Image (spheres, grey):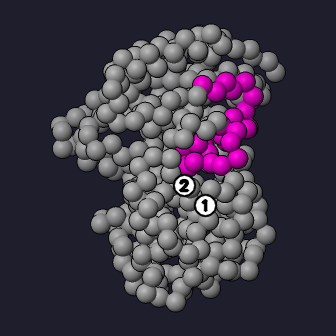
Amino acid sequence: MCIVLDNSGEPWVLIVRMLLLFEDQDDKSINDPMVGGGIEMFCRSIYENFDDVEVLQMPFERTGKKGATKEKARIKQSIINKAEDINADVILSNYTRAIFYPIESPIPIMFVQHSFWPFPVIDLWTRVLEKGHSLFLVSELQDKYYRKQARRFNFKYPSLTGYITPGYCKLKQDILTTEYDCGTIGRCQSDKDPFKLKHMTKDTDLKTLVITQTPTYNKVYYERNKHWDNVVWDKPYVEVMRNVAKCGTYFSTWNKETWGITSMEALSCGVPVILNSNNDGDHASEVIPASPSHFKKIINNDKELLTNAIKSLSKIDKKEVQEMTWEKHSLENWKLQLFDAVSKTISNHKRPVMSQFFN
């Protein structure tokens, strides 16, 4: 990774060696043509766009796994050992349970907290920051959620390092003829609930598309929903994007979709988005669209509002949506933000950087 720094007006470059922790629930590699979700896409984007990035594949942790405490200790030490072996300047840790691992690391860690934990993690955040590591959120809705949690448990809310934008526009699709009134993407599991789109529109004349993957475990949700028509299963990223471009609108079924990458991808194809908000009227992805006219929020699971939003947004200028999205979520903008986040992580740790400066 190369970080451009401003040194009295002169351009300098900091060469940084990164250890990137990567987790996939099906234990796929970072190069697999199928992309599991936003976390995986975020890692792949870093891997594809920065030099001197070493990937450490993390085992996907199952809740309640026997011997979990011992396994966590082993994983924690393996991360530190690998970082020291490659002389890493920074560790980037964004997988699901990353926040629970090696805060004792002598190498600065850039923690990216993407989830909504149902139990208090604020105290742990404080310890992470006291050790000189950095902590970034990916959604303002997360900040709101955790501030509420801090008040509830009487924790002092720490001064977080900042926010991370989830990604950038990758594949610029042609503006295609609309084949489906609305589509959605999501893992085939009950929290993401991509088939909510089917259930909410089943009594209408709308043609809808679900793009998902066959699960490798806990197939109860899959068995309940595998009967639906117009479902795209297990396709590589390129084909997923092609199918998204055929939709008139995109429905984000899960209001805690913090990464917001699927909404961004839909918008990058010129497809406006509909956000299924929580009971407070919030949705984690509402910061993604480039214009308020490119999306609508509906009250949580309101079928009539969804139908109305699909029909009203179908009249939008798709080319305008696409161009404005590509401008907001450009690769250049995303890389500059990552540069800044990594630079802050290293600087905050007050550790001598084992890297080369040159002008």
On screen, residue 9 versus residue 145, left or right, reads right
The residue sitting at the right extreme is 359
Kindly tell me whether residue 232 is visible in this rendering.
yes
| Marks 2 and 1, the one that precedes in the sequence | 2
Q: Position of residue 61 (x, y in %)?
A: 43, 33
| Residue 313 makes an appearance in the image | no
Q: Is residue 194 left or right of residue 175?
A: left
Q: Which mark is residue 305?
A: none
Q: Quadrant of residue 181?
A: bottom right
**Residue closest to the eye, 74 or 338:** 74
User: Residue 233 has which mark?
Assistant: 1
Q: Which residues are the magenta region?
A: 30-56
Q: Which mark identifies residue 214?
A: 2
Q: Residue at x 70, y 39 (%)?
A: 31
| Residues under numbered marks 2 and 1 in contact, where contact means CB atoms less than 8 Å apart | yes
Task: Please tell me which residue is depicted at 47% across the width and 13% down the height of the picture.
Answer: 77
| Residue 219 x/y as whole percent | 43, 53
Amino acid carrying label 1: it is: Trp
> Could you say which is closer to the camera, residue 203 or residue 46?
203
Quick check: 356 above or below 192? Answer: above
Q: Which quarter of the picture shows residue 185?
A: bottom right
The answer to whether 323 appears left or right of 38 in the picture is right
Picture residue at 36% right of the left edge, 17% below the top? 70
